Amino acid sequence: NKAGQISKTDRVFTIDGDNMVRQDFFNVVLEIDDEAQKDYVFSWCGHNVINGLTYGNGGVKLWPKHIITNMESHEKATTEQDAVDFCWMVTYFQMADTMSDVCVNGSPEQAFRGGYREGIKLSLDQGILPDKWEYLTKNHYKNLHRLAIWCSAGLDVKYGDWAILGARMGTYDTNVLRKDHTLIADYDYMQNFCKQEIFEYADETKRKQAIYDYGIKLRKHLQFRIADLDADASKWFKMVYTNPTRYGVMLTERDIK
């Protein structure tokens, strides 16, 4: 809201503190129809440095001033979808180009929180939590693939194990325990929760065991196919993995899902 209030232009860029914008972005020219596209929110892909995924998570956003000024924060959202993320907005457009690197491994807490949040968000169908037995059939396969990668790759990167633990825990808490997934919008709750988990799994041996145990639980209760990749296997995976091609200059979040 404050970004919109202080802006002197009709549109506002938002760049997360852990988002390193690539130089090519500053050469982008985007033609916007002020009438037909006045409510459009544009999102560029961000490359995740932990697991190699490239999608809207953490990327640069371009908002109309009137939307970001009047937008409710997640914790004040009136719908289940907006309580978790704004990407399910009808006018939210995902651009095809990757214009930044999302560095979510600055600390154990940051990596864990990022993984936990995506473990929840990628479990949802258009922002709505499916029934447990519909987990693999209701969710779009691209989101399931992204979530499987969050839960599997990254041990070659500093604090990558924390991201994997967070993703597996978030997936399990949401889909198996049916924990209130909108709590990730409660910043006070999440701050305390993450600190507790960081303390609980500060010991590396205990953390490794927890990652392994959550993997067993996810395979058993959700039939979710994830892998226990070590550092070398994670490097290899990111070397050979190709993120899905995006077609067209801009696509809605629903189109790409």
Image (cartoon, rainbow, N blue to C red):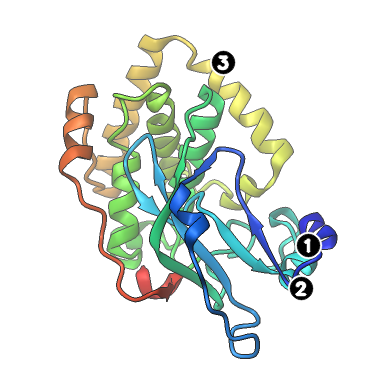
Badge 2 vs badge 3, beta-carbon distance below 8 Å: no
Badge 2 vs badge 1, beta-carbon distance below 8 Å: yes
Q: Is residue 209 above or below residue 31?
A: above
* Residue behind mark 2: 66
C-alpha span from label 2 to label 3: 42 Å
Mark 1 / mark 3, whichever is N-terminal: 1
Q: Is residue 154 above or below residue 208?
A: below
Residue at 84% x, 61% y: name it: 5
Residue 112 appears left or right of 52: right
Viewer-nearest of discs 1 and 3: 1
* Secondary element at image label 2: helix
Q: Quadrant of the N terminus?
A: bottom right
Badge 2, how many Cα within 10 Å: few under 14, some, many 20+? Answer: some
Amino acid at circle 3:
Phe
Q: Position of residue 122 (x, y in %)?
A: 42, 54
Badge 3, how many Cα within 10 Å: few under 14, some, many 20+? Answer: few
Q: Quadrant of the C terminus?
A: bottom left
Q: Quadrant of residue 61?
A: bottom right
Amino acid at circle 1:
Gly
Q: Position of residue 114 (x, y in %)?
A: 50, 39
* Secondary element at image label 3: helix
Residue at 24% x, 48% y: name it: 223
* Secondary element at image label 1: helix
Q: Position of residue 151 (x, y in %)?
A: 33, 38
Q: Residue 133 versus residue 102: which sits nearer the camera? A: 102
* Residue behind mark 3: 199
Badge 1, how many Cα within 10 Å: few under 14, some, many 20+? Answer: many
